[in-house]
Image: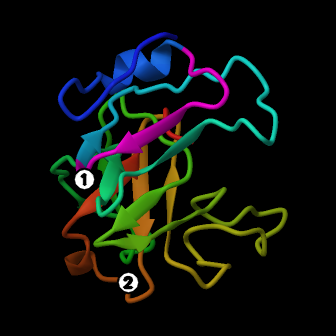
Amino acid sequence: MGSVYSETSPGNLQTLFASGLPCGTTVLMKGGNYTLDNLNLQLNTDCAETKPITIMAAPGESPVFDGGSYEQYTWTQGTGDTSIWWTNLPADLEFNALCLVDGERMYPYPLLTPLPIDPTFPNLWDLNYDLPGYYRNKQNQVFIKTLDKKKSTIRRLFFQNDSIA
């Protein structure tokens, strides 16, 4: 790669990560919040155990990688189960499995309502896993149900962007 970044000559993370880091590289991160916005780390080669690519905090620093979406949402109470609340998500918001409501992780449920053929199959309506959760449909709507079953607990909703592993 040939580039050496330092405190007096810092590098751009997008450029650094997109270039493909060679084996044996150590990236020391300063403290602060790093918004990821489609940041992709290109790993094109398998590194030997003795020459790993290491991304770590610089001594005494606490970097935070933030790939979340912090939007204001308008909530609608569900029909049938009034303890479920739903909202429309932005069309470009992609996320896989991390959803937080007021800092509490929501479990991804595979179904919104019970299947007639197997009503015991895990679904948000019944909270079969006894965990607070969410369900996202193909229309880009997300449905949330907390254990206390109150909308008032949905003050801050966070989704992890799909680009983060």
For disc 1, the neighbor class at 10 Å (few under 14, some 14 to 19, many from 20) is some
The number of numbered discs placed on residues in the rendered structure image is 2
* Viewer-closest of 53 and 74: 53
Q: Which residue sits at x=42%, y=20%?
A: 16
| Sooner in the amino-acid sequence: mark 2 or mark 1 | 1
Quarter that holds the C terminus:
top right
Question: Please, is residue 87 above or below residue 49 in the view?
Answer: below
Q: Which residue is mark 2?
A: 149
Query: Tag 2: residue type?
Result: Lys
Question: Please, is residue 58 above or below residue 123 in the view?
Answer: above
Magenta stretch secondary structure, dominant: loop
Residue 26 lies in the magenta-colored region: yes
Residue 114 seen in render:
yes
- Part of the protein shown in magenta: 20-32
Query: Tag 1: residue type?
Result: Gly
Q: Which residue sits at x=50%, y=12%?
A: 19
Q: Which residue sits at x=38%, y=64%?
A: 100
Report which quarter residue 103 is drawn in: bottom left
Helix, strand or loop at label 2? It is loop
Q: Which residue is mark 1?
A: 31
Residue 102 lies in the magenta-colored region: no
Contact (Cβ within 8 Å) of mark 2 with mark 1:
no
Q: Position of residue 127 (x, y in %)?
A: 59, 78
Report which quarter residue 44 is drawn in: top right
* Viewer-closest of 154 and 74: 154
For the residues marked 2 and 1, what is the alpha-carbon distance in whole angstroms?
A: 38 Å
Report which quarter residue 152 is drawn in: bottom left
Q: Position of residue 142 (x, y in %)?
A: 41, 51
